[in-house]
Amino acid sequence: MTNDQLIYGLRPILQAVQDNQTIEKVFLQKGLSGSLYAQLEGTLRDAGIEPKYVPVEKLDRVTRGNHQGAVAYLSPIDFFDLEEIIVAAQEQGRVPLILALDRITDVRNFGAIARTADCCGVDAIVIPKNDSAPVSADAIRTSTGALLEVPVCKVAHMKDALFLAQSLGLKVVAATEKTETDMYAAPFNEGCMLIMGNEETGVHKSLIQLSDAQALIPMSGQINSLNVSVATGVLLYEAVRQRKA
């Protein structure tokens, strides 16, 4: 049984996975057993979907229906293959611009970033399967529909996306205040992947170490801190400026 993007019940969720519908997340009740429950767990595992195990009270808050210990959310969009996006851009003679979001969890930031990405001609937005804001109806509304226009790619680990981009000739640029290289020196005029980091901790240290370049936004105020959606806009428009120079 479904309600908007919500689907609940063991058989409906099992059928949705078997039909290759795009599942955003799955909640399973802790401590349940039974053949159908085990079949659903196995099917989710084979599909690369990691369920979250929660108390029954959480599921009861989500729906008053007979959820049978299982609730899932269908994604309102289909996800794209990052390699296909990059290769298609290169074959068309374009210089790819990919935006990777490392553990950005606020839906409003995510939507605002997607809106700016669309305005700047970003070829794809990359997000991790875990520790990321959901591609939900709220995110789409905040993005004013941009998430329906800009391809979104999900990866198991952000390092996978970084290594793939580099193997296809892209430069990986990490946004960080822990560098002396300002954004004007970043190689945005080449094929590149810009990585923006978590609202609190920024880009993960391991990704900065693996990046080809870092970009610092010059600031002269007392706060010296920008909201991540604003910072993304600043850097993306620097990429636009370099590419038109």
Image (cartoon, helix red, strand yellow):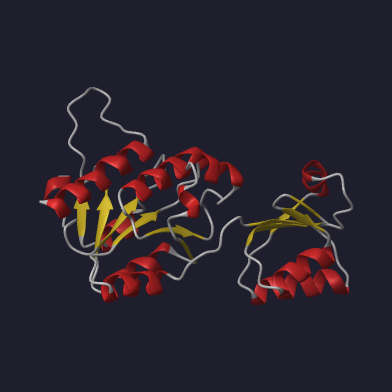
Residue sitting at x 81%, y 45%:
63
Count up the numbered dots: 0
**Residue 141 appears in the figure:** yes
The x and y percentages for residue 113 are: 40, 44
Q: Residue 172's image quarter?
A: bottom left
Q: Quadrant of the N terminus?
A: bottom right
- Would residue 242 be found to the left or right of residue 3 on screen? left
The x and y percentages for residue 69 are: 83, 57
- Would residue 51 be found to the left or right of residue 166 on screen? right
**Residue 180 appears in the figure:** no
Q: Residue 189's image quarter?
A: bottom left
Q: List the single residue furthest toward the top.
A: 222
Residue 176 against residue 93 in the figure, above or below: above
Residue sitting at x 42%, y 47%:
114
Q: Residue 167's image quarter?
A: bottom left
Foreground of the two, 103 or 10: 10
The x and y percentages for residue 112 are: 43, 40
Residue 34 against residue 204 in the figure, above or below: below
Residue sitting at x 25%, y 29%:
224
Residue sitting at x 79%, y 41%:
61
The x and y percentages for residue 99 are: 35, 55
Foreground of the two, 53 or 98: 98
Residue 169 against residue 104 in the figure, above or below: below
